[in-house]
Image (cartoon, grey):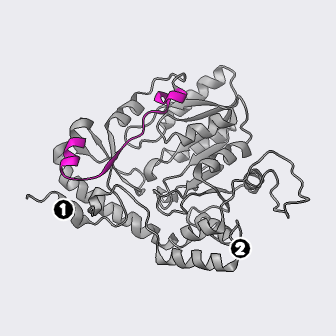
Amino acid sequence: MKKNIENWFYPVVTKNSVNLVNRTIKSGYVNEGKVAVKLAEKIAKICNRKYATTVSSGSTGLVCSLMAVGVKKDSVVILPAFSFIATANAITLIGAIPVFVDIDKETFCIDHLKLKEKINFLISKKKKISAVVTVEVNGRSSNNFYIQNLCKKFKIPFITDSAEALGSTYFKKPLGGFGDLSVISLSPNKIITSAQGGIVMSNNKRLIKNVIAIKLHGNHIKGDGGSDKFYRYGLNFKLSDLHAALALGQINEINKRLNNVVKLNKEYEKNLSKYGFKFPKMIGNGKRLWIDCLVKNKKKAIKFLNEKKISYREFWHPLNQQKSYRNYRSKLTNTNFVSQRGLWLASNFNLKVKDIRDAFKKK
């Protein structure tokens, strides 16, 4: 049997989740309904949002959000070059054009000053920008206050990909609480999971109404499935009550899980700093979902971790180096630097400080 530290991450389903799922099955109603609504309301409260709706995944949540603000074929959308590929794919699947911006080396998130430069450049070329999408990587944040004001000044819709940020904050404001729309993921490697799922949130009722219409085939009002009328394009991006119940049963675990990661990070830093591992601070007092670090030589670092039987996951490749996006050329110095040196260390919910100490004990 593997030790905890040998497992990078895995979901932990609580007894409360099992009870809620069983209760939902017994109710006879397993489609999207009251349980999904309750989950959306709970998460909206955590993120200090007025409105929220469940979706089938964080990825489909991004598609719905982009369409809700008017992104369409040939629209220009700005995003960071460092993210999971779903952020870029949501844009290109609509037929829009992604424009990549470099990140900050300390936050791993879009550099707000380089974003400003890119906006000014595109405007000078008479390009209309249909949206800015930022990514709150691993509970970290760009200067969201600056970006929010910047987008407001140029009247550009601002969407945050907050997939990995539930429970984290940026200078006391909850992540998932910035922008015209924000999207949380509930996939298996997130702070809570519904197996697959997501939440889209906003303080703008019209935008959430648009998202709901898109996820219900094209009408924000759920009908009987027969004589329904539809006024826009959409698909089935709903989240079933079964999935929602699974996540709802973990809501009370969020703070406990994030606080444990804080302790784990301190212990990793204590033991690994002398071997060239750097653990960037959380700017704005946010909380990590996973333990992230930078190393000088990734090959040597991985060899060392394997010797200690510490599981890890490498940072994403820059988006413009993925096969689908190689035609989008940009100078992305910081993105390349971080991608080449970054690792996420074992951070599963059952991992304890003692497990890390034991890994470094002399045998």
- Outermost residue, right direction? 227
Compared across the picture, whether 276 is left or right of 283 comes to left
Residue type at tag 1: Arg
* Image label count: 2
Query: Quick one: label 1, few (<14), some, or many (20+) residues within 10 Å?
Result: few
Most foreground residue, 355 or 40: 355
Local SS, label 2: loop
Where is mark 1, residue-wise? Answer: 357
| Displayed quadrant of residue 343 | top left
Residue type at tag 2: Tyr
Quadrant of the snapshot with the C terminus: bottom left
Most foreground residue, 43 or 361: 361
The residue at the point 60 percent across, 31 percent down is 98
Query: Quick one: label 2, few (<14), some, or many (20+) residues within 10 Å?
Result: some
The residue at the point 70 percent across, 31 percent down is 75
Where is mark 2, residue-wise? Answer: 29
Magenta-drawn stretch contains 303:
yes
The residue at the point 81 percent across, 62 percent down is 222
Height in image: 110 above or below 48? above
